[in-house]
Each structure stands twice: as structure tokens, then as C-alpha cells.
Image (cartoon, rainbow, N blue to C red):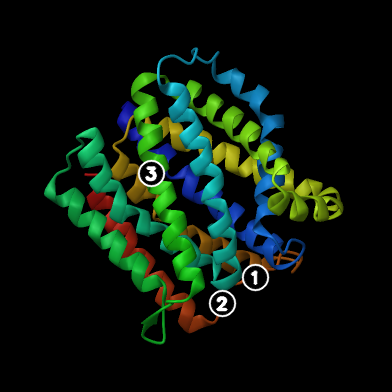
Amino acid sequence: MDQYLIALFIAFLPPILYSFSNLLESHMSHTNFKNGVAIAFYANVINICFVPFLLILGMPQPITGGTGWLFLAMAVCELAYLVPYYAALKKLQVSVVASLFAMSSLIVPVLSWFILGEKLHPLNYLGFFIVLAASFLMSRSRGAVHINKGFWYMVLACSILAVNLIVITKLLIEMNWNSVLFYNYVFTSLLVCSWLLVKKTRRPIVRAWPVFRANLKQFFLLDGLEVAAGTAGVFSLSILSVVVKDGIGNTQPLFVLMIGVMLKTFGSGSLSFKESMNRREILRKATLLTLMLAGVVLLTL
């Protein structure tokens, strides 16, 4: 099979896996953890346990030149976006939060054009705008966009992620994809430990320690999903353009909705998350997400 087609297939794994983690994070933020800093800290500390397994992909190349600063910038972005993201999960439905990640698509093409010199065909950009429009419509309720704190939290989170995507792409020019993945988790795990040095972030982390211990299995499941998604994402980005990879990632609300419906219908009720599941709402979201998939097809031509 052609390497590009393999990368396209693998690029759909992150939105599927992140959908599971979105629902789990929504459950955690509404039940056990009241502070997003604590969730972000413990989730990233556990990353250390997964780092040795990444060596199966191959030994990482040594860090040279200015790549060290790029890895530091990537780690800062990986941690910084989590705080507004977890805050948004408290304000908005999970599928709406997932759809608002498409706002990063407003920034990514501009940055990739200026910084990376990437160019796409007109049909690719048409697909990009279809995906973006469908994502924005997903966030509408009773004829108006959710212009509340949750919306603005996602604007901030998406801006940080757009910058991070460009940084990762620049790193992939300098190093192979498994090296970028390995150092990403190493730098992020080490940097998050610095939160213990700041009183404002240390306090909620210490308070959440008993809850973390009681929910250790959930955290390992969450980290396992995100490490697998991150691995697939970095690999596909090493072959696909930034805008194509970003557009495929915007199908995540479709998977959030599908998995959410299945969990609400067939689940035991042990996993609670913020999501409207009435028939009319599901039909509206399904229609928009079908439109979104049509945009993704145009994006990948």
C-alpha cells in the first residue's frame, strides 16, 4: 500500500482515540477533579511510565542545534493548552468542545504558508472551509454560538495548539518522527514537574493526590489513549501536510458523538459526561458531521 494512503488511514486514529480520552476527561472534570491543573499534572507525570516503550520504535537521534529550544516550546504548548481545555469541558458539551478544536484550522494554514511554505490546491482549501464551517455550526444552540467563557477558553487552547503543530512540523524537518515523539514526552514530563515549584499550581496538585491515587486506573487508561493517539499523529504528520492532518483531526466530534451515544445507550452509567443526547440534537450533529466528512474527503484529494 502507498505510504501516503497508510498515513491517511493512521491520521484517523488520533481523532478516534482522543474522542475516548475527551469523554473520560469530561467525566473526571465533572466528578473527581475540580481543578484542570491537577488533571493535567497527573496525566503528564504518568507519561514517564510510557517513555521506555517508545524506544521500541527505535533509538532517538541526538538533539542538535536549535532543536532543544523547539522541544521546549513544544512542551510548553502541550501543557499550556490543557488548562483552558479542561476549563472548557466544564462549560460546554464534549462534542461541542471537540468541534471547537477546528478553530485551530483558522491559524494553521496561515502559519504553514508563512513559516513552512506549504501550498494546497483549491479543492483542499474548499474542504478546509467546509470542515471549519460545519464545526462552527456544531457549537450553535438555539441560533447562537456559545459565546461564553467555554468558547473563549477554546479560542485560547486552539491558538496554542496551532503554534504547537507548526513547531512539531519544523522538528520533523530536522529529525525522524520517533525521535520527535520520544523527546516530546520526555520534555513534557520533566517540565510539568516544575509546577510543583509554584505555590499557585502546587496547592491543587497536592489537594488532588488522594483522588489521583483512588483513580489511578483511569489515569493510566487516559494516558495510554493519548500516547497512542500522539504516536499516530506524529507519524502521519511526518508524511502529510499540516493542513491535511489538521483537517482530518477535525472529524473528532463525529467520533465523540458516536462513542457518546453508544456509552449512553449500552453503558453501565459509571462514566458520566456533559453531552446532550436527545434525538433532535443527535440528528442535527450527525448531519453537520456528515458535511464535515465530505470536507475531509476534499481536503485529502
| Residue position marked by numbered label 3 in the rendering | 163
Element type at mark 1? helix
Label 1 close to label 2 by CB (< 8 Å): yes
Name the spot of residue 77 as percent of width and height, x first.
49, 43
Name the spot of residue 68 as percent of width and height, x first.
47, 23
| Among numbered discs 3 and 1, the one appearing first in the sequence | 3
Query: Which label belongs to residue 264?
Result: 1
Q: Residue at x 42, y 55 (%)?
A: 158
Q: Please identify the quadrant where the N terminus is shown.
A: top left
| Residue position marked by numbered label 2 in the rendering | 277
- Residue 254 visible (yes or no): no
Q: Residue at x 76, y 65 (%)?
A: 270
Give the class, few, some or many, for how many residues have Cα within 10 Å of label 2's Cα (few <14, many ≥20).
some
- Name the kind of residue labelled 1 in the image: Lys
- Residue 81 versus residue 169 in the image, above or below: below
- Residue 151 versus residue 176 in the image, above or below: below
Q: In the image shown, does 155 or 128 lie closer to the viewer?
A: 155
Q: Residue at x 34, y 29 (%)?
A: 170
Q: Residue at x 48, y 16 (%)?
A: 63
Q: CA distance from mark 3 to mark 2?
A: 34 Å
Element type at mark 2? loop
Name the spot of residue 238 as percent of width and height, x first.
37, 29
Q: In the image shown, does 195 or 241 lie closer to the viewer?
A: 195
- Name the kind of residue labelled 3 in the image: Val
- Name the kind of residue labelled 2 in the image: Met
